[in-house]
Amino acid sequence: MRGSVTVTLRCTALCLIGVTACSKDQPQTPLPPPSSVAHSPQVENPFQIAEAEVYVGSWRIDRSAYVGLSASSAEAATAYLRAALSALPKDAAPKRDVYQRVDLDAGPVYPMDVAWKRIGSESVPILLLPAAHQIRSTLSSPDLNLAFSGAPQVLGRTVLFQPGKSSEAPVHVPALPRGSAISAGVFKHQPPHLKLGKLVLKGRDADAPDREPLAPLRIGEKRGASLVAMLRTVPAFPQNPILRIAQIEMPNQPQRAWVSYAILDANGARRGTTSVLPSGESSFAKPFHSEIHDPHVGRHSLLRLPTPIRLGTNEGPYEEIALDEWFCTAKPAMFVVTLDPSSTPFRESFNLRHIEPDVPIDEPIWMVIVFSNIEPTDLIEGLRFLAPGSELKNEDSLLVQLQQLHKQVLTQ
């Protein structure tokens, strides 16, 4: 169905990071608890979050992904994109509507339900992302699994499982929009987790199979649940809201880790009146459909990851839509997130589209994603696509300038 994550019962290989789903006939061994959290290296003159947003005319560039990386790498990538945008009309940036939540006169509070009003419009942000090799080279070790060593501090955790006949649903809150909170008691009569086949953990939750909230699943016990995988995430750098190190651990298989890019809150206001949709997805989940690349383990998309949260607090559970390393290797390395026709404010349905000049996009654009390693000719064509009918100034000399700036980006 358009606008929703494709859910299948296949065991699909995750290209690039080499993850394959385990057979249900394979022995199920409970996973050990994580030792977690990332130790980021000290970077001289790191880029700061306060400097993240810049404008070129009406074009808005979001550089949040560079927080913790060197300021020189952020400036090189910005100069590259800025030069291309400067050749376009300064008022040609696409717009998106802005809405504000309002209190309902009666009924449940957000995110159980939602009402809104339109308060204006704003330029669609261009999310500028560093290439994965740049992030890997900045970290302390090329083995990304080492990001999960040391004392736990900030960690996201999702347990994927196949329920058994003796499994009981934990009374636990499903993943919610970032910053919201609901009492777990709201779900005590119809806990959704057995139908979802996953449990996203809060900051104070244990992830040992014999402790709450996992104990009711009876993981590894006779007629109990079979563990499919544990997903974990940590920030690549402190205060960075975009860059993550993601890890998957599956029974009888080595741990795998990869760089991921959190681009969207994965959850919003509830759809319908139940906690689980007929598709098997959470009714809080924002559908995200990517025909380009969408790796799965069983029916679970690996583009939907737990949000890192501070352990020892009652924060969470939250999730993010997060791209993996495949996207920065795509040609061209430029994408748009669009709103599906089924989308409504605070219950958005997203589609991810590859920018291809010969393929029109009729849906409203929510976000533009540009990887800094994109080739100059692809960048020009992609921006021309965003501003149809616009003439680029001095295109031949622009291309020469972009080629020089592109070399500087790659050497940072």
Image (cartoon, rainbow, N blue to C red):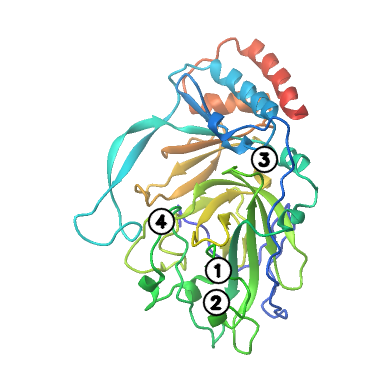
Which amino acid type is marked by label 3?
Cys
Kindly indicate whether the residue at mark 1 contacts the one at mark 2 (C-beta within 8 angstroms). Answer: yes
Which amino acid type is marked by label 2?
Glu
| Distance between mark 1 and mark 3 Cα atoms | 34 Å
Q: Position of residue 220 (x, y in %)?
A: 65, 83
Residue 290 left/right relative to 96: right
Residue 85 left/right relative to 66: left
Kindly indicate whether the residue at mark 3 contacts the one at mark 1 (C-beta within 8 angstroms). Answer: no
Going from N to C along the chain, the mark reached first, 2 or 1, is: 1
Going from N to C along the chain, the mark reached first, 3 or 4, is: 4
Considering depth in this image, is 173 or 89 the residue closer to the camera?
Answer: 173
According to the image, label 4 marks what residue?
A: 180
According to the image, label 1 marks what residue?
A: 205
Badge number at residue 267: none
Residue at the (64%, 14%) spot, across then down: 398
Number of dots carrying numbers: 4
| Distance between mark 3 and mark 2 Cα atoms | 39 Å
Which amino acid type is marked by label 4?
Ser
According to the image, label 2 marks what residue?
A: 212
Q: Residues within 10 Å of mark 4 (few under 14, many from 20)?
A: some
| Distance between mark 1 and mark 4 Cα atoms | 17 Å
According to the image, label 3 marks what residue?
A: 328
Q: Say whether residue 90 is visible.
A: yes
Q: Residue furthest left?
A: 105
Q: Residue furthest right?
A: 142
Going from N to C along the chain, the mark reached first, 4 or 2, is: 4
